[in-house]
Image (cartoon, rainbow, N blue to C red):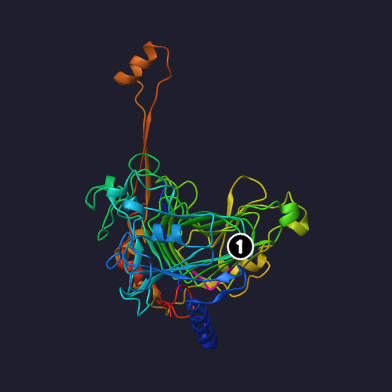
Amino acid sequence: MAAILLAIGLVAEAQVGNFLQRAKKTVAEKTNMVAENVTSKTLSTTINVLYVSIERGSARAEGTKDAPMKDIQKAVDKAADGDIIRIAQGNYLGNLDRGWIQIKGKYVSLEGGWNDDFTERNPIKHITRIQPSVEQRGTIGQGLLMIESTANKNAQMIIDGLFFDLGLVHEYAKADPTDARFGCPEGCETGRIMPVGNPPNKTIRLIGGKMAGKLVIRNCMFLNASFNAIIMTNMGGDWEIYNNVFVSNLYASCEINGGLNQNTGAHQSTVDFHHNTVLFSWPTTKEMESMGYGYRFKNGADHNVHHNIFGCNNYGALDGGWDDSNLPADKRKICSAYDNLFFMNRGDLVMAANSGGKWLYVPGKRFDEVEMLTKYENNRELPSTSKFKDVIDQAYLKGYASLEIITTESYDPNSAANLFREALGLNKQGTMTTRVTMFGNRYNFDKAVQLFGAEPGYGAQLPE
């Protein structure tokens, strides 16, 4: 029997002081979108605004504020480079409710969080979601939002105020805490997620694809993905991913790869990942042998990670296991991780050891010893005085804190099956069973929304 017991680390209160005010100001300034009719310096064209409302919209409408469209996909198809699509509250499932949306060959921005008549925007109050259900099993593509726009490195795309959730699509074990087979801690709304990759559970991301140019993803929520919340390839451009909530995603919460030839394009792909809340990133299988990362320092891009909260990421908050040592020193990726809060991660940073085949699990307080990090200051455990952990679903958190993996083996050489195999000249076999007390259980949508603004100055703040 192997067991993993995780405990909450609590240390002295962090000093946020004047930084808190600066952080709020920064998030507020960056969240304000451009006016409805402005000139795009990067695309040299007039930006138009299209409106989408599932309640007031029509399939054949023109997309004006008074006559909004009904379908985000049709608005994307109609929009030109640089246009903004403003989306009212509601659940949007793409063309004919197929369950996903695609942006291909153009640069348009999606802005959710509007009320039905577009007089007020508040992504937390007027929730714009992409939340398919079992009805969309079999019609969802590789992800809920797939982006393929690589033609213009000077262009910009903004994904703002969309809440993604796959928790109603997957099959989960029964919510019965009395039966160990189901992996359901007391109080959780489902048992463990059933094997991913086998029907009906496909490997589905929330945002995927590749893009050149500036990409901004902000004020979004990423929940219950079965194959990464965000997994994309940066084909050259400065990307910013901030003020988002990531909860209960398999494989990893955010993985950005660089897609340029590093001999000619090194350091042209950057990612600034900041003020995000990243919780409960799960491995690939219930045996929990690989993956389960918050943010991955992948090759081909420079990464700047700061002012995030990383908690309960099963394998590691940060994945530093990708080595650029085969490249010249001046072409290697530049990575920084500073001013982050950590708690209950198996490792705050996971790195490959020099030999022996094992991983190194580095706590945040020792990031100064990690050569791959250019900037590393002020990483620490969540303060003991923080109220953040009280906002997390308590049943889910308690279940994770007492998570166990139990493996049993049996071998009976005289079983009927083995005697039959022996008669055929085949090797005899045993069986191995792995049970977990929890794995990839669905996290409640409404409880995840409450994580915005839970820790002043760190993680996702309330959108302004």
Magenta stretch: dominant secondary structure: strand
The amino acid on which the numbered mark 1 sits, given as a three-letter code, is Gly
Which residue does the image show at 35% across and 53% down from the upper left?
A: 95
Indicate the secondary structure of the residue bearing disc 1: loop
Q: Quadrant of the C terminus?
A: bottom left
Q: Is residue 332 left or right of residue 247?
A: right
Which residue does the image show at 48% across and 81% down from the upper left?
A: 28
Residues in magenta, as a range: 305-309
Q: Residues within 10 Å of mark 1 (few under 14, many from 20)?
A: many
Determine whether 92 is above or below 45 in the image: above
Determine whether 196 is above or below 418 in the image: below
Q: Is residue 159 left or right of residue 372?
A: left
Residue 80 within the magenta-colored segment of the rendering: no
**Residue 438 in view of the camera:** no
Determine whether 422 is above or below 90 in the image: above
Residue closer to the observer: 229 or 278: 229
Q: Position of residue 387 (x, y in %)?
A: 38, 78
Residue closer to the observer: 170 or 47: 47
Q: Position of residue 348 (x, y in %)?
A: 53, 63
Residue identifier under label 1: 213
Q: Position of residue 103 (x, y in %)?
A: 48, 56
What is the quadrant of residue 305 in the picture? bottom right
**Residue 321 in view of the camera:** yes
Q: Position of residue 335 (x, y in %)?
A: 65, 63
Which residue does the image show at 63% across and 70% down from the upper left?
A: 376
Q: Quadrant of the N terminus?
A: top left
Residue closer to the observer: 72 or 300: 72
